[in-house]
C-alpha cells in the first residue's frame, strides 16, 4: 500500500449506483445503472465507480454483469468497485462470479460497532478481516477496506483503529476508506484524525467518505483533501440515505478553486449528469443547490443586474458558462431598469425609455402579486403596455377536449396562420397530451415542428379554491436551448394552451 499523499490530483470514487441507491424511494433498473455508469466514466470522467453491493438480488447481478462487460470492453475493469462483506468468502465468490476485479470490503471502524453489532472481540474481527483479505487476493481481486463508523472510532476508540490498521498494514490492501458513517464530524476533527493516521502509517492510501447530516459534508471533504487524502467519495446531487452523501459538483468546484489540488472531472458535464440522475431517480434538486440548482445563476435584485452590466461586479469564479449554462436576470418586484435592459438585450428588443419605464412598472405590479415574470413573458407585457395586440403569426382559434371514464381523451384543435386555418383531431393519455398531438398535426400542415417539452408545472395559490387562477409553466427545448412560457387562467388546460401558444409565436419565424 503506497501513499500518494502529495498527488496534485484527488481521485473521485462516485458511489451513486451503490450508496446513492440507498436514497429512500430510489431503485435503478439494470439499464439505468449501465446508462449512469457510462455517463460518469466517459463524459464526466470520474476516476472510479462503486457500482453495487454483492449478494443483493438477481437484478443487481444482472446490472453488475452488464456494467462489467462494458467496462472490460473499454479496458477499465479495475475502475469498477463492488461493496462486499466479511462473510466467509460469499461476497468474494459473488464478485468473482460476475467478473469483478475490485472488492470494497466493509469492516468495523469503531469498537462499539465491533462488539455490539458483530458481538466479537476486536482481535477476532481483525483476524476475520485479514483472512477475508487474503482470500480475496488469492482469487485475483484488488481489495479496498472500508472502516465503517470510522469517525466515531477515532473519537471514542482510537486504540481500536490503530490496532486494526497495524494488523492489516502488511496485507494486500490498496486503499483504506474512511467513512463518516453518521455524518457527525466537523472540519477540524477531520484534519486532526487524518493527521493522526498519517503519523502512525505514513504510507497509507486513504479515501474519505462523508455524509451530510449536519450540512458540512463539503467542508469536511475539503479538510480531508487539504490533509492529503488520495480520494473522496461522491454521489450525483448528493444522493444517499438520510441527508445524503458528498455532492460531486460541489466537491469539484471547491477543490479546483480553493486548494492547490485538482479534480479531473469535466465541469461542463456536471449539469447534464445532475439532470439525468434527477430524471432517472425521480429526486429533484433544490432550486438553490450549488452549481446544478435551477436558479443558482439567476440574479433577482436590480442592483446586481446594474453592477453586472457595468462591470461584472456581482460575478464570482462560478461563472455559468463554466458549466455550459447562462446567467439569467429574474423579473419581479425587485427588478430595476438594469434587469429589464439585460432581458431586452437577450431578446434583441430595443424600446424607448418611456416604454421601458412602463414595462418595469408592469413587471413590478405583477411581482407584487407573487407572479414570477419570465423573459418570454416580456413581449406580451410590452404589447399590453403599448395597448396593441402582440403580433402573432399563429393562433389557436378554437379547441375542444373531451374526457370520460375508461376512455382515451379526445381533442379537436383549430389553428390559424397567415390567414389560413386548419383543424385536426387526436387522442392522448391525458387532456393536454391529446391537445398537443392534435396541434402537432395542425403544425405539420404548415411544415412546422413542435419543440420538445422538457418540464410541465402547474401552480395554484396555497389553499386556493376550485375557481382559483392556475399558472401553467412549461419548459421547452428549442434547438438545444431552454425556453420557458407561462399561461394563466382559471382552467388548468386553458392555461397550458396559452403557454403553448406563447411558445409557438416565439419560435415561429417572423
Image (cartoon, rainbow, N blue to C red):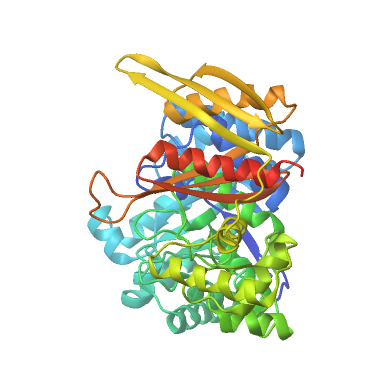
Corner quadrant of residue 33 = top right
Q: Can residue 427 be seen in this view?
A: yes
Q: Residue furthest top?
A: 407
Vertical comparison of 146 with 504: above or below: below
Q: Can residue 96 be seen in this view?
A: no
Task: Identify the residue shown where x is 65% and y is 62%.
Answer: 11
Q: Is 219 displayed left or right of 257 in the figure?
A: left
Vertical comparison of 317 with 38: above or below: below
Task: Identify the residue shown where x is 41% and y is 79%.
Answer: 186
Name the one closer to the observer, 391 or 388: 388
Q: Is 126 displayed left or right of 288 in the figure?
A: left
Q: Quadrant of the N terminus?
A: bottom right
Q: Where is residue 280 in the image (x, y as percent from the top left)?
A: 51, 40
Q: Where is residue 272 in the image (x, y as percent from the top left)?
A: 63, 50
Vertical comparison of 234 with 281: above or below: below
Q: Where is residue 312 in the image (x, y as percent from the top left)?
A: 70, 82
Q: Residue furthest front?
A: 387
Q: Quadrant of the C terminus?
A: top right
Q: How many labels does the image show?
A: 0
Name the one closer to the observer, 165 or 463: 463
Name the one closer to the observer, 366 or 140: 366
Name the one closer to the observer, 488 or 317: 488
Task: Identify the residue shown where x is 22% and y is 54%.
Answer: 463
Q: Position of residue 286 (x, y in %)?
A: 45, 60
Amino acid at each position: 500500500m503506497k501513499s500518494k499523499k502529495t498527488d496534485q490530483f484527488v481521485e473521485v470514487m462516485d458511489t451513486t449506483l451503490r450508496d446513492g441507491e440507498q436514497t429512500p424511494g430510489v431503485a435503478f433498473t439494470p439499464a439505468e445503472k449501465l446508462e449512469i455508469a457510462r455517463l460518469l466514466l466517459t463524459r464526466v470522467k470520474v476516476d472510479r465507480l462503486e457500482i453495487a453491493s454483492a449478494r443483493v438480488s438477481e437484478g443487481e447481478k444482472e446490472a453488475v454483469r452488464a456494467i462489467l462487460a462494458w467496462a472490460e470492453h473499454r479496458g477499465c475493469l479495475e475502475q469498477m468497485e463492488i461493496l462486499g462483506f466479511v462473510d466467509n468468502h460469499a461476497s468474494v465468490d459473488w464478485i468473482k462470479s460476475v467478473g469483478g476485479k475490485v472488492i470494497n470490503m466493509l469492516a468495523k471502524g469503531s469498537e462499539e460497532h465491533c462488539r455490539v453489532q458483530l458481538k466479537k472481540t476486536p482481535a477476532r474481527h481483525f483476524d476475520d478481516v485479514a483472512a477475508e483479505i487474503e482470500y480475496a487476493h488469492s482469487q485475483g481481486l484488488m481489495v479496498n477496506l472500508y472502516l465503517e463508523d470510522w469517525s466515531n472510532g477515532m473519537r471514542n476508540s482510537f486504540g481500536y483503529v490503530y490496532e486494526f490498521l497495524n494488523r492489516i498494514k502488511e496485507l494486500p490492501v490498496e486503499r483504506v476508506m474512511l467513512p463518516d458513517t453518521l455524518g457527525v464530524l466537523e472540519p477540524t476533527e477531520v484534519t486532526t484524525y487524518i493527521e493522526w493516521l498519517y503519523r502512525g502509517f505514513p504510507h497509507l492510501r486513504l479515501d474519505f467518505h462523508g455524509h451530510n447530516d449536519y450540512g458540512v459534508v463539503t467542508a469536511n471533504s475539503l479538510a480531508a483533501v487539504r490533509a492529503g487524502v488520495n480520494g473522496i467519495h461522491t454521489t450525483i446531487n448528493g444522493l444517499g440515505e438520510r441527508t445524503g452523501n458528498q455532492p460531486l459538483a460541489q466537491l469539484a468546484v471547491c477543490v479546483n478553486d480553493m486548494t492547490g489540488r485538482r479534480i479531473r472531472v469535466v465541469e461542463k458535464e456536471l449539469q447534464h449528469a445532475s439532470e439525468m440522475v434527477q430524471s432517472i431517480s425521480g429526486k429533484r434538486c433544490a432550486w438553490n443547490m450549488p452549481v446544478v440548482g435551477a436558479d443558482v445563476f439567476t440574479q433577482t435584485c436590480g442592483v446586481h443586474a446594474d453592477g453586472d452590466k457595468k462591470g461584472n461586479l456581482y460575478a464570482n469564479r462560478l461563472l455559468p458558462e463554466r458549466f455550459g449554462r447562462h446567467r439569467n436576470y429574474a423579473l419581479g418586484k425587485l427588478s430595476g431598469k438594469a434587469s429589464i435592459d439585460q432581458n431586452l438585450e437577450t431578446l434583441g428588443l430595443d424600446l424607448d425609455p418611456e416604454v421601458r419605464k412602463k414595462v418595469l412598472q408592469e413587471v413590478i405590479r405583477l411581482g407584487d402579486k407573487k407572479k414570477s415574470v419570465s423573459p418570454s413573458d416580456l413581449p406580451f407585457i410590452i404589447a399590453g403596455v403599448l395597448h396593441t395586440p402582440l403580433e402573432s403569426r399563429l393562433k389557436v382559434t378554437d379547441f375542444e377536449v373531451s374526457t370520460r371514464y375508461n376512455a382515451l381523451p379526445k381533442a379537436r384543435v383549430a389553428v390559424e396562420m397567415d390567414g389560413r386555418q386548419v383543424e385536426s383531431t387526436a387522442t392522448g393519455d391525458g387532456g393536454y397530451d391529446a391537445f398537443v398531438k392534435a396541434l402537432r398535426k395542425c403544425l405539420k400542415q404548415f411544415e412546422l415542428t413542435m419543440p420538445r417539452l422538457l418540464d410541465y408545472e402547474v401552480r395554484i395559490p396555497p389553499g386556493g379554491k376550485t375557481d382559483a387562477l392556475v399558472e401553467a409553466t412549461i419548459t421547452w427545448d428549442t434547438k438545444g436551448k431552454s425556453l420557458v412560457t407561462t399561461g394563466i387562467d382559471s382552467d388548468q388546460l386553458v392555461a397550458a394552451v396559452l403557454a403553448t401558444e406563447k411558445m409557438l409565436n416565439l419560435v415561429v419565424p417572423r
